[in-house]
Amino acid sequence: MPIFEFKCNACGRRFSALIGVIAEPKPPACPRCGGTELTRLVSRFSRVRSEDDALESLCDAFAQGREIKVGIRGLCADLAERRDTAPDHTVFVQTGPGYYCTGRRLFSAGTQPVVRVRPGIPMRYVSRGWDYGWLMPRSDGLIAGWICDPYTLRFRKTQRRYAIRWFVR
């Protein structure tokens, strides 16, 4: 049975309805006001993709030379005074060179240099509240980093899992 989207002409509510495929299907009614004067809308749809499909699309986009960015949730939380009070945030980073490891089925990409700043609302500059470095996000959520303390110019390696979204343009 197909799902159709409707807009109620009486109250303006948008809703979806499961419509049976029979000779005389019962017309749907608005769940808010019960109205039956409806406008059928062009449905938007989404496709559930497997992890393999998404990874294949990402690799294809990279092979075509398309621009790839990553959104990394909570990347700067470790700079907060207390990690548990850091505001929820996502940092968007442009990627550069990348590769696909066929044996492990992982896509990895290097990033442009990233400046990380202590998260806060409002965001303020705080001495010792920032650093910079390079990241290597992977499609399994692991991010390896080469982070520099700007005051000592000492580098440290980091490795941690984050929620990551990949964007292709």
Image: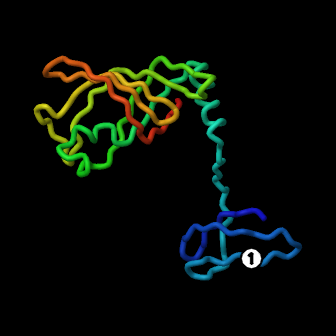
The mark tally for this picture is: 1
Q: How is the image coloured?
A: rainbow
The image position of residue 120, as x and y in percent, is 21, 45
- Answer above or below: position of 122 versus 111: below
Q: Secondary structure at mark 1?
A: loop
The residue furthest right is 23
**Observer-nearest of 103 and 95:** 103
The image position of residue 112, as x and y in percent, is 37, 21
**Observer-nearest of 72 and 152:** 152
Q: Residue at x 62, y 39 (%)?
A: 51
Q: Residue at x 22, y 27 (%)?
A: 131
**Quadrant of residue 103 in the image?**
top right
**Observer-nearest of 47 and 43:** 47
Q: Residue at x 32, y 22 (%)?
A: 146
Going by the numbered disc 1, the residue's amino acid type is: Pro
The answer to whether 84 appears left or right of 140 in the picture is: left
The residue furthest left is 127
Q: Residue at x 68, y 64 (%)?
A: 40
Query: Which residue lies under the disc numbered 1?
Result: 27
The answer to whether 149 appears left or right of 76 in the picture is: left
Neighbours of disc 1 within 10 Å: few (<14), some (14-19), many (20+): few
Q: Quadrant of the N terminus?
A: bottom right
- Answer above or below: position of 104 versus 72: above
The image position of residue 34, as x and y in percent, is 61, 82
The image position of residue 35, as x and y in percent, is 63, 80
